Image: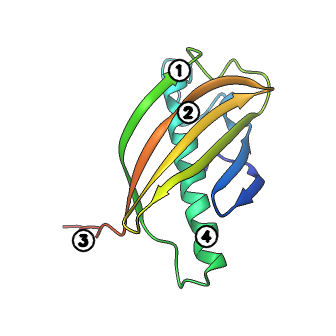
Amino acid sequence: MCLLDGVVQAAPEAITCRAASHRLPDHPMRQAGRLGAACGVEYAAQAMALHGAMLAEQRQAPQARMGFLISLRGVKLHVARLDDIAADLTVHASCEADNGDHCVYGFRLSAEGRLLVEGRATVMLDVPVPAPT
């Protein structure tokens, strides 16, 4: 499930993406016909993953590192839902700390300059994935 439509700007320390998928009537995260603002965390997580993949490509790494979202802090939902936002979403994630095995990102979602969702996330990297049984 890819929610982002494209990259607006990318740098080693941050990424800004855009998305219009929040308006889709068949959005996979809709519940009872609405897309709650907390779903904005998934948009931010996808921007973080894309940022990591772009950094891996710049380093000419054989593949991007697998990341797991392990913590959210200071998440503020400034709206109740996203599906009624007419404008495209701007999704920004900035890497505030990277110690090699985990990263801390600050993130925010906005539309036409209006802040919708913000917070911080910790992503653990290179966690082995258990084999299916």
Residue at image mark 4: 55
Q: Nearer the viewer, mark 1 or mark 3?
A: 1
Rendered view: 92 above or below 63: above
Give coordinates of residue 65: x percent, y percent: 46, 71
Disc 4 secondary structure class: helix
Mark toward the start of the polypeptide (4 vs 2): 2
Amino acid carrying label 3: it is: Ala
Disc 1 secondary structure class: strand
Q: Is residue 36 visible?
A: no
As measured in the structure, the alpha-carbon distance from the residue carrying label 3 to the one carrying label 2 is: 30 Å
**How would you rate the neighbour count of disc 2 (Cα within 10 Å): few for under 14, some for 14-19, many for 20 or more?**
many
Mark toward the start of the polypeptide (2 vs 1): 2
Residue at image mark 1: 77
Residue at image mark 3: 131
Residue at image mark 2: 40
As measured in the structure, the alpha-carbon distance from the residue carrying label 2 to the one carrying label 1 is: 9 Å
Q: Looking at this rendering, what residue extends furthest in the left direction?
A: 133
When asked about the image quadrant of residue 14, the answer is bottom right
Give coordinates of residue 54: x percent, y percent: 64, 68
Rendered view: 30 above or below 94: above
